[in-house]
Image (cartoon, helix red, strand yellow):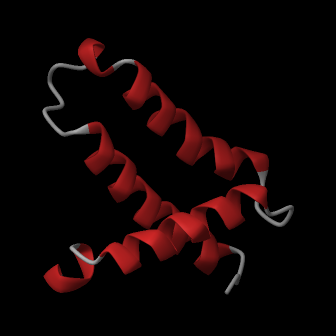
Amino acid sequence: MMRKLLSLRHWQQTFVRIFQLLRSKDVSLLDKLIFSVPVLLYWVLPDVMPFMPVDDIAVTMLLAEWFARRMETKYNIK
């Protein structure tokens, strides 16, 4: 598991999946916003949320993995 999380190939594939899901007409706009808005806000407003000592990249990576799995399961994409 840890080897997978540290793998650049894994994260490259994850972000390719995210890009495809965000462009997909099968995925609803609401689902796309559920991923995009928190990520964008965390990137733009990190100083407003001092109680979250997690790096912007780490938050994006965690949300990307969650979003990709959830959308692929929900819409039977793969």
Q: Quadrant of the N terminus?
A: bottom left
User: What is the tally of numbered marks visible in this picture?
Assistant: 0
Residue 59: where, in percent of width, then height? 31, 46
> Does residue 59 appear left or right of residue 74 in this picture?
left
Depth order, front residue of 28/3: 3
> Does residue 50 appear left or right of residue 23 in this picture?
left
| Residue ranking furthest to the top | 48
Image position of 69 with respect to 27: above or below: below
Tell me the quarter of the picture where residue 49 sits.
Answer: top left
Tell me the quarter of the picture where residue 4 sits.
Answer: bottom left
Q: Quadrant of the C terminus?
A: bottom right
> Does residue 18 appear left or right of residue 59 in this picture?
right
Image position of 65 with respect to 58: above or below: below
Residue at 37% over, 18% down: 45
Residue at 18% over, 84% down: 3
Depth order, front residue of 72/3: 3
Residue 32: where, in percent of width, then height? 67, 49
Residue at 43% over, 21% down: 44
Image position of 13 with respect to 47: above or below: below
Residue 18: where, in percent of width, then height? 59, 62
